[in-house]
């Protein structure tokens, strides 16, 4: 019992102390991924890739050995432990486990992370960090290239609230919704399902062709399919096809001048999703992620998007 109490006190003390202060950090969009530069102990720069649908903090082995030895306890991982990084087909061996506190951006936080060699597939990433682990509301503004950690009700006043749900397997949020697409004659096709919110996905909307429901949706939407879209992928097994509707509607959001990529989203974790909502969708808004309350708030900042309410 005493050990449990000590761990609980350590964990609570590691929360971002942001009630009185917000932290504004730079944001970079590169090849469809979101990056930020953070500091450890006010001196060590760390290139961070931000994720909304990834289950674990992953630290690059090279960075951990160079900068974190002596700052945190690094426990050697069992030989059988590995992790699958998004966008790669093979699993990566985990070399160390870290469960310790660090001073990050001037605040003490608890890090529950794995260490793996990311140099071959995920270059120039010191750490992959799920927004869930920040334990506070996070504002993402891709237009102004900044993120803000911490927030209050005043920030989200007037925003559209998405009724999302939480997937504990990937520490991600997903939106149960109906995707409606319209052709130039305003004829509509619809598909109902769960869509994972993923800032690491470069396009606006992906459809999962491992779902029979999506295959039928593509078939009846054939008039909106960009012909000969195999050129978008050299890997035929991905079954890539591109839909170009005149407009897209999800909930009370209408989006124009955007296309939809349908492909096979392989993996056990992706099979339960009809699709993914990526950062080309979110770049039309200032987005507030509140993992504590399982909510996402959107404030439009683009002419290509319209809120119906």
Image (spheres, rainbow, N blue to C red):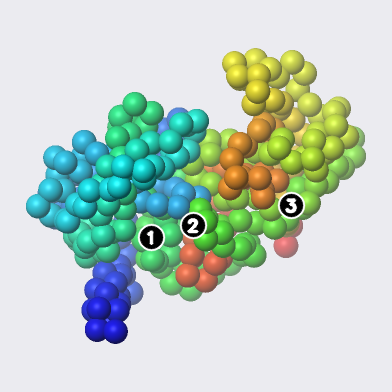
Q: Which residue is mark 1?
A: 133
On residue 193, the disc is: 3
Q: Earlier in the sequence, mark 3 or mark 2?
A: 2
| Residue at image coords 14%, 40% | 66
Separation (CA) of disc 3 from disc 2: 19 Å
Query: In the picture, residue 110 is in which quadrant?
Result: bottom left
Does the CB distance between marks 1 and 2 fall below 8 Å? yes
Residue 161 figure quarter? bottom right
Q: Are marks 3 and 2 in contact (CB under 8 Å)?
A: no
- Looking at the image, which is closer to me, 51 or 155? 51
Residue identified by numbered label 2: 171
Q: Is residue 35 left or right of residue 55?
A: left
Q: Secondary structure at mark 3?
A: strand
Answer above or below: position of 288 versus 240. below
Q: Residues within 10 Å of mark 3 (few under 14, many from 20)?
A: some
Q: Residues within 10 Å of mark 2 (few under 14, many from 20)?
A: some
Most extreme residue toward the bottom is 1
Q: Is residue 126 left or right of residue 216?
A: left
Q: Is residue 140 visible?
A: no
Which of the pair 90/20 is nearer the observer? 90
Q: Mark 1 packing: few (<14 Cα in 10 Å), some, or many (20+)?
A: some
Q: Who is closer to the viewer here, 119 or 281?
A: 119
Marker disc for residue 37: none
- Residue drawn at (50%, 45%) of the image: 199
**Residue 270 location (% of width, % of height):** 61, 45
């Amino acid at each position: 019992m005493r050990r449990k109490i000590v761990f609980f006190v350590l964990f609570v003390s590691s929360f971002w102390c942001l009630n009185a202060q917000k932290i504004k950090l730079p944001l970079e969009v590169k090849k469809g991924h979101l990056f930020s530069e953070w500091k450890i102990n006010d001196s060590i720069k760390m290139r961070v890739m931000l994720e909304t649908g990834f289950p674990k903090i992953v630290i690059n082995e090279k960075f951990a050995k160079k900068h974190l030895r002596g700052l945190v306890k690094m426990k050697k991982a069992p030989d059988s432990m590995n992790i699958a990084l998004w966008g790669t087909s093979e699993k990566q061996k985990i070399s160390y486990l870290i469960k310790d506190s660090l001073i990050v951006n001037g605040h003490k936080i608890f890090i529950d992370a794995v260490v793996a060699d990311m140099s071959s597939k995920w270059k120039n990433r010191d750490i992959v960090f799920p927004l869930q682990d920040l334990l506070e509301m996070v504002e993402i503004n891709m237009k102004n290239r900044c993120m803000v950690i911490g927030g209050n009700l005043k920030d989200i006043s007037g925003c559209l609230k998405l009724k999302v749900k939480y997937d504990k397997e990937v520490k991600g949020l997903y939106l149960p919704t109906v995707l409606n697409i319209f052709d130039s004659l305003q004829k509509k096709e619809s598909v109902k399902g769960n869509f994972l919110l993923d800032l690491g996905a470069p396009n606006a909307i992906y459809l999962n062709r491992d779902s029979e429901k999506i295959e039928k949706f593509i078939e009846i939407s054939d008039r909106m399919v960009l012909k000969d879209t195999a050129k978008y992928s050299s890997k035929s097994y991905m079954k890539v096809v591109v839909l170009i509707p005149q407009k897209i509607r999800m909930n009370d959001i209408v989006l124009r001048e955007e296309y939809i990529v349908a492909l096979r989203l392989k993996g056990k974790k992706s099979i339960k999703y009809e699709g993914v909502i990526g950062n080309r969708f979110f770049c039309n808004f200032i987005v507030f992620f509140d993992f504590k309350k399982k909510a996402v708030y959107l404030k439009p900042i683009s002419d290509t998007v319209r809120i119906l309410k």
